[in-house]
Image: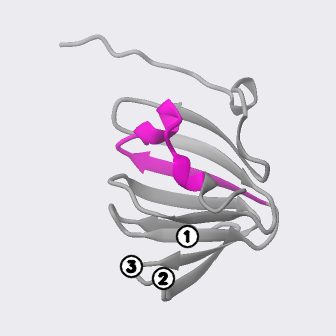
Amino acid sequence: MSEMKVRHVRWDDLDCETVTDQIRRRMVSGDRVMVAQVYIDEGAVVPTHSHENEQFTYILEGALHFWLGEDGTEEVVVRKGEILHIPSWVPHKAKALEDTLDVDIFSPPRQDWLDGTDDYFHEGES
């Protein structure tokens, strides 16, 4: 039997990474699950992307407009107190309708977030 390592983390004790000038995040990762606080300024866009990771997005404050699927024709607005489940490999894009704080949960953890190779955030930036 392996020894379990238990961690207790305060969000405010974690560094807040600047992803773009309008998106910031903090994250905690285990072996099979990652949890992230994501701060998205009103009007900011997360470009279309997909990933192997199953995702749950829980809105704590604000609202996000999502475009889902290959052609982006499925749309949903997720507001405070609501959760969106995005299965693996479903293409999705989001725009903040107001200043937003969400909690994203990923399984498995987002390796591209951990190693800084999440270049899709910068597509279309000059």
Q: Please tell me which of labels 1 and 2 falls first in the chain.
A: 2
Is 28 part of what is drawn in magenta?
no
SS for callout 2: loop
Residue 44 percent coordinates (x, y):
74, 63
Task: Count all numbered tags in the image, as a single digit.
Answer: 3
Q: Are marks 2 and 3 in contact (CB under 8 Å)?
A: yes
**Residue type, mark 2 in image:** Gly
**Residue type, mark 1 in image:** Lys
Residue 104 percent coordinates (x, y):
55, 52
Residue 45 percent coordinates (x, y):
68, 65
**Residue type, mark 3 in image:** Glu
Tell me the distance, in whole angstroms, between the alpha carbons under discs 3 and 1: 11 Å
As drawn, the label of residue 70 is: 3
Does residue 26 sit above or below 91 in this rendering?
above
Tell me the distance, in whole angstroms, between the alpha carbons under discs 2 and 3: 6 Å
Quadrant position of residue 99 = bottom right
Residue at x-position 18% and y-position 13%? 1
Q: Which residues are magenta?
A: 100-121
- Could you classify mark 2 by the number of other residues whose Cα lies within 10 Å: few (under 14), some (14-19), or many (20 or more)? few
Question: Is 68 or 54 nearer to us in this picture?
Answer: 68
Residue position marked by numbered label 2 in the rendering: 72
Residue position marked by numbered label 1 in the rendering: 93
- Could you classify mark 1 by the number of other residues whose Cα lies within 10 Å: few (under 14), some (14-19), or many (20 or more)? some
